[in-house]
Image (cartoon, grey):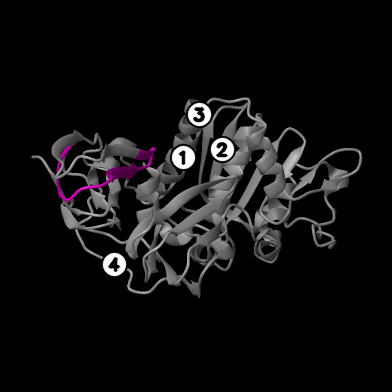
């Protein structure tokens, strides 16, 4: 299934960023790690120091847990195993055990499943544990080390970052591996609920049939003149509502990782919305005289894929009802419309033509998407049936 669909289905399961709160997760996962560790670590490594310098007690006996369901995906060389168990008090335990050879795959596996198992909702229901073995590396949220003559405890987030930035893979390989991880997760839970269906047919069944708009921002800041705002962490796809009250040059840049997006650049008073990417830590650079404000909202839901308005806008998420959309505008100056899907941004229109009107392809019928509109003019977009 597409990532945008995951945002709709398991939004509350995702952490801000990728493994940023490792230390706080240790207490909630340590007890289950004791059990899983005995399958992977040598006998002499069963008591090692955690990142906080505490020793891990001996493992819990496997007999204390009764397996309800278990499934192995992949091969002997590279496998992902899901196991659902319970103890004598009927407390549930979900264990995800991954044996991965290539480091970049182990990193993506850690980031993907790590976001899931560290969610408060899943921890309350299943006591989840994630264990990833990659050659001599043992990865688990809040408890990662290298097995060798001397056990080396390290920061899992830094290791994953290095493994991904070192390359050695094609983006097509990443997309396929990411898709496989997603299929494993949903297939396992569908089997558990006796509702196993083909992944593609499940995509077709997902239709947004309600409207929901977030009324309160999860971040708000206001100021006057040039300023820099750091440490703004995003959850899912969001939009920033930016307001500047006077004429004169005004711009807002959103920095994340090693790049930035130019969110606003104008010499007119500004009141509009612009896309904020998910699971990033932003630094905003504001340039311009006068009062301004920035409010960041989660993107809502829409039961329709027809929209109209004026100026910069980010639509709610919707189900595409066509592969072709008709766009009409009234006004002049630069104008663009982008469609955002699981695969990124698709630039549908980019023009300076006055009163633009036309039909464009947006090949995402039955998929989840949202629109981003840029331009100081009236506009309308609707599907062509």
For residue 184, the mark is: 1
Mark sitting earlier along the chain (4/2):
2
The circle drawn on residue 1 is none
* Residue 57 at x, y percent in the picture: 81, 60
Q: Is residue 46 above or below residue 214?
A: above
Whether residue 258 is visible, yes or no, is: yes
Instruction: Tell me the residue at 79%/57% (across/down).
Output: 51
Separation of residues labelled 1 and 3 (CA atoms): 20 Å
Residue 171 badge: 3
Question: Marks 4 and 1, how far apart in space?
Answer: 32 Å
Is residue 362 on the magenta stretch?
A: no
Mark 1 or mark 3: name the one nearer the start of the chain: 3
- Secondary element under disc 2, as helix, strand or loop, is strand
Measure the alpha-carbon separation of dots 2 and 1.
Answer: 8 Å
Image side of residue 281 versus residue 179, left or right:
right
User: Mark 4 or mark 1, which has the lower sequence index?
Assistant: 1
Front tag of 4 and 1: 4
Residue of label 4: 213
Q: Which secondary structure is most common in the magenta stretch?
A: strand
Is residue 303 at all visible to an observer of this figure? no
Separation (CA) of disc 3 from disc 4: 34 Å
Of badges 1 and 3, nearer the viewer stands 3
Name the quadrant of the C terminus: top left
Taking depth in this image into account, of 291 and 167 the one nearest to the observer is 291
């Amino acid at each position: 299934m597409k990532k945008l669909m995951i945002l709709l289905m398991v939004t509350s399961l995702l952490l801000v960023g990728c493994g940023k709160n490792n230390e706080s997760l240790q207490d909630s996962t340590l007890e289950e790690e004791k059990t899983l560790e005995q399958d992977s670590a040598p006998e002499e490594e069963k008591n090692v120091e955690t990142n906080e310098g505490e020793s891990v007690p001996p493992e819990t006996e496997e007999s204390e847990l009764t397996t309800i369901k278990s499934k192995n995906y992949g091969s002997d060389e590279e496998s992902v195993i899901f196991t659902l168990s319970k103890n004598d008090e009927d407390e549930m335990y979900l264990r995800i055990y991954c044996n991965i050879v290539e480091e970049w795959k182990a990193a993506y596996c850690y980031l993907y499943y790590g976001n899931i198992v560290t969610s408060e909702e899943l921890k309350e229901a299943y006591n989840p544990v994630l264990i990833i073995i990659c050659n001599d590396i043992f990865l688990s949220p809040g408890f990662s080390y290298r097995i060798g003559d001397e056990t080396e405890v390290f920061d899992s987030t830094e290791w994953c970052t290095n493994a991904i930035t070192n390359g050695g893979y094609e983006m097509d390989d990443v997309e396929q591996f990411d898709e496989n991880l997603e299929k494993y997760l949903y297939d396992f839970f569908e089997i558990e609920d006796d509702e196993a269906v083909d992944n593609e047919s499940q995509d077709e069944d997902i239709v947004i049939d309600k409207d929901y708009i977030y009324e309160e921002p999860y971040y708000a800041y206001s100021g006057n003149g040039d300023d820099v705002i750091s440490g703004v962490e995003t959850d899912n796809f969001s939009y920033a509502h930016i307001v500047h009250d006077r004429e004169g040059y005004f711009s807002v840049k959103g920095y994340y990782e090693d790049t930035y997006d130019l969110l606003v650049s104008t010499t007119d008073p500004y009141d509009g919305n612009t896309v904020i990417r998910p699971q990033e830590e932003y630094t905003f650079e504001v340039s311009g005289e006068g009062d301004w404000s920035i409010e960041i909202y989660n993107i809502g839901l829409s039961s329709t894929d027809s929209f109209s308005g004026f100026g910069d806008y980010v639509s709610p998420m919707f189900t595409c009802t066509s592969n072709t959309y008709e766009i009409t505008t009234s006004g002049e100056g630069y104008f663009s419309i982008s469609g955002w899907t699981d695969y990124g941004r698709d630039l549908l229109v980019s023009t300076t033509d006055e009163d633009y009107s036309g039909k464009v392809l947006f090949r995402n019928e039955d998929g989840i998407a949202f629109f981003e509109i840029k331009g100081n003019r009236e506009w309308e977009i609707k599907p062509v049936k």
